[in-house]
Amino acid sequence: MSNDYKQKYIEMRHKLIESVDVAWRDGYEQGAKDAQMQAQQQQMEAQAQQAAQQAAMMGGAQPGQEGDPNAQMSPEEEQMMMEQGGGQEPMPGQEMPMEGESTELDSKLAELQDLVSKGEKPKVLDLRKIVNELATVRKSQIENFKNKNKKVETAQRSLVKNILKKWSDESKSVTDDLEKILATDGLKLD
Amino acid sequence: MKNLSFSALSKIGNLIEEHFNSLSLKFLGMIPNLKKPKKPGTSISFSVEPNSISSLFIEALGTETPTKPEEDALKSLLMISDSYVDALKDRTKAQVMQEISAYTHDMGKQNKPINMTKVSNIFEEKMDKAKTHFEMIAGQESHKAGNVGTAMSIVKVAENIDDNDPTVFFIVTQDDKTGPYEYILHLLPDKVTPRLWKLSEVTANYFKPGDQYPSLSGLHVFCRCKITYLPPNFGFSENGHIKFIAIGHDEFKIQREKYGLPSVPAKISKKKQK
């Protein structure tokens, strides 16, 4: 599988927008009554946007169906997503996933794609689970890099220390051998 | 009068040679005949010793099965390190043989016995100097091996996201051993935010004061700065940690526009260093 992370990010983001909208709707239904009218208007607008978006994107659920999402994420929701996936603030030295580690990430993305391609509205809990798993994958990759950097630094220090120890240990026997050479050469020693 | 025989002198030379060869083997971490492979066209197989240049490079690379270019890079590193150790070996051998030969000659002329303590002192003095030099080679070359391995792993990661000239920076350990050039080439004037470079700008040559670009070999002997990658869309927080900023964010471009290339003096006075 090619590792086009940018494309995958864009696709995943679209799908997440949908899922966040589901959560938003659920929250709204349990929300205050005085916001009901306003929310309905937003939902109507969202349905229109979603209809166009879905037709273009994946031919999934139709406008008006249950779970029909709003196409926009609020700044708070975007922030939440960042905190879960890409908005962490790692230490210097932490990088993007290595080749090979992408397999796990690919499987999570495929899982997400599979849910959506079935034409069913993914449950909020399912999506949350996948987002959390993705965040876990990212965290573990960050941790791997951190560990690798530490290992390289420790290995470098250990290399210099060991080689100097070897030098000291072996130079003692060289001094002894030197004395033997001079003694066997017939020189008069003190 | 009896002088030190040629045979004895050769044996002293061999002693030093064996000492260096044993260290070199441990230091490089593999036993290849780089110049003469057994069968032309076949790749040289080798086993990697722990705590060696080879193991360090493999560790930094993040894979135990290097590609041909990575293997070539490792061989180049080993050849260069080996050449430095070889040069030190030859020089030390010549100096020890010269001084012991001269001493025994002088004692012979005066018909005096050879003082073994004096001989040992001559030997130890030369070997101590060589040890200091060897420590510098070990520190410098191992640092380079780690950074070259990391740089090659950065290229791999960047290629996966179509980043053809990855943005990199150096992680600086700030203490009393931090050199003045690290504050210029590895950090921004705030002394906190890492200064960004394109990997193509980072040289593999040894750094000389006044050089405009940083080096994978470090900026001074015992330099501890480690190269690392800044992925697209990322930048730095106020405390200099990597942080996701936004899609399309180009921290390198912003830094370069704001700060340009640093002015690197060929000499920095001790007062300024403080």
Image (cartoon, coloured by chain):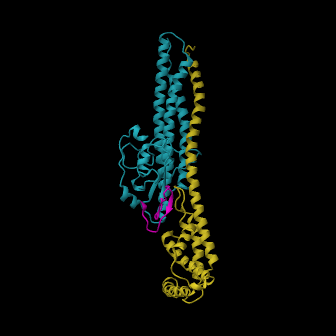
Chain colours: A yellow, B cyan
Q: How far across and down, in percent of the image, does residue B49 sit?
A: 59, 45
Would residue B17 be seen by someone viewing this image from the given angle? yes
Residue drawn at (41%, 37%) of the image:
B270
Q: How far across and down, in percent of the image, does residue B274 sit?
A: 44, 40
Q: Is residue B101 magenta?
A: no
Q: In the image, is residue A76 above or below residue A158?
A: below
Q: How many marks?
A: 0
Would residue B39 be seen by someone viewing this image from the given angle? no
Name the outermost residue toward the front.
A34
Q: In the image, is residue B92 above or below residue B50?
A: above
Q: How far across and down, in percent of the image, does residue A39 sit?
A: 55, 85
User: Residue B64 falls in which quadrant of the image?
Assistant: bottom right
Q: In the depicted view, which residue is nearer to us: B265 or A117?
A: B265
Q: How far across and down, in percent of the image, does residue B207 sit?
A: 41, 44
Residue drawn at (49%, 73%) of the image:
A7
Q: In the image, is residue B200 above or below residue B108?
A: below
User: Residue A25 falls in which quadrant of the image?
Assistant: bottom right
Magenta region: B230-251
Q: In the depicted view, which residue is nearer to us: B181 or B39?
A: B181
Q: In the depicted view, which residue is nearer to us: A166 or A111?
A: A111
B272 sits left or right of A20 in the view: left
Q: In the depicted view, which residue is nearer to us: A89 or B210?
A: A89
Q: Is residue B250 magenta?
A: yes
- Judged by its main secondary structure, the magenta piece is loop
